[in-house]
Amino acid sequence: MNEQSWSPETVAVVAGRPPHQPGAPVSPVVELTSTYVSWEPFGATDPGVYGRMNNATWRALEEAVGGLEGGTALCFASGMAAGAALFSLVPESGRVLMADSCYGSMLSLAGALAQAGRFSLTLVDVSDTEAVVAALPGADWLVLESPTNPLLQVADLGALGAAAQRLGVRLAVDNTFATPLLQNPLALGASVVMHSGTKYLSGHSDVVLGLLVAHDAELLEGLRGYRGLHGGILGPMEAWLALRGLRTLAVRLDRQQASAGVLAERLAGHPAISRVRYPGLSSDPGHQRAKSQMRGFGGMLSIELGGGREAADELVRHVRLWVPATSLGGVESLIERRRRIPAEPVSVPENLVRLSVGLEHVDDLWRDLEQALDGSGE
Ligand SMILES: Cc1ncc(COP(=O)(O)O)c(C=O)c1O
């Protein structure tokens, strides 16, 4: 048995630990240093000489996430810092195709860069594979998410990855919702995988970070250079917290997606709900695609309320166990009407409420939603 054959659940637990040597710590250390002793005071070119370029706790986290995604990982101060580094890879005056249902701040960042003349931007509907493939010729990058936040659309990663490779277009996939336990875009033709590590990877709503994973040496050099020069680096303590959270990703996700499936079914039968968006439901437009390319359907779902925006606000106001807060992927269940955020794209319905299912008992989560829906005037 060698390290290559370990299952992802095992990699999440063992990767990035110090070697098994007598007296060695079992957990990696939090390496709190801004600089490193140099043997060549006037000629040091090793990137490990300074804390903006390198840190042992980052390396432990990067080894674990890289091992899970099948590439080399680089950590950043936030998911958005990782996103900014990703866009730095687009050639000057290049052409970017981007899913119109990507996370709102990623769309805002791409829009601002396009407006500043950095590159041209075309938005595409990732659920329409043919249309995306038709738009690929001449593009430099295709940037997408699957499933998307918060519409839960599913892109055909295999078909898009193959078409992008055939046409010389780089594909970047934000894998935040799925996590590397449910899908590995690099294996399907992506050049870069992005994560808001703030969410499932760290899993406890106590740290903000981002990661990019790639295997192309040139792309990695560009990303490492960008991170070192722009300085959006992760604190060692945050890297350690994220790695500690990652150790339990598999068990958390098992519970979260089992509960999400139960809640999706129950919500679909509730008279106040006009639509449930969850790829695990056989009626969901992304179900067959998700079934063929994912190893589970994840812990995120969105619901639309028949009573409109007001009913959605009332639901969020009346829950007691669910926490009304943005973000997702933590142990505690979060609920949010997404359009309350002014930057959220108008393609997100006003009556849509996003649910991030945590580790509480599913019946408690259901009872809380039920009482809040019954109090919402339906
Ligand atoms: C899918 C997705 N990508 C990227 C981000 C940005 O990550 P961060 O908030 O860690 O900067 C988020 C944040 O919500 C997200 O949901």
Image (cartoon, helix red, strand yellow):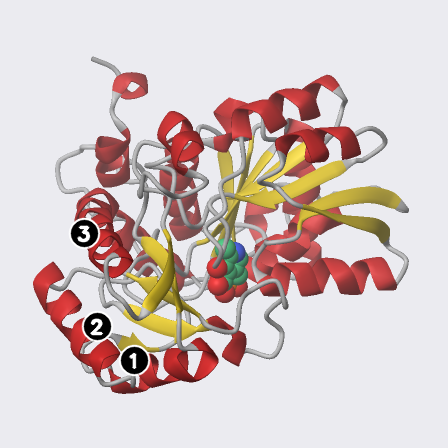
Q: Earlier in the sequence, mark 1 or mark 3?
A: 3
Q: Where the C terminus falls, by quadrant?
A: bottom left
**Considering the numbered disc 2 on the image, is that residue within a helix, a strand or a loop?**
helix
Q: Nearer the viewer, residue 292 or 281?
A: 281
Residue behind mark 2: 369
Mark pair 1, 3: CA separation: 22 Å
Q: Earlier in the sequence, mark 3 or mark 2?
A: 3
The amino acid sitting under disc 3 is Val
Residue type for callout 2: Leu
| Residue 77 relative to residue 165: left or right | left
Find disc 1 in the rendering and name its residue: 378
43 shown above or below 199: above
Mark 2 closeness class: few <14, some 14–19, many ≥20 residues within 10 Å: many
State the CA–CA distance, disc 1 to disc 2. 13 Å
Where residue 371 appears, as percent x and y from the top left, is 16, 79
For residue 62, the mark is none
How many angstroms separate mark 3 from mark 2 (CA)? 13 Å
Residue carrying label 3: 262
Q: Measured along the vertical axis of the image, is residue 356 above or below residue 126?
A: below
Occupied quadrant, residue 11: top left
Question: Residue 364 versus residue 327: which sits nearer the camera?
Answer: 364
Q: Residue at left 57%, top 40%?
A: 127
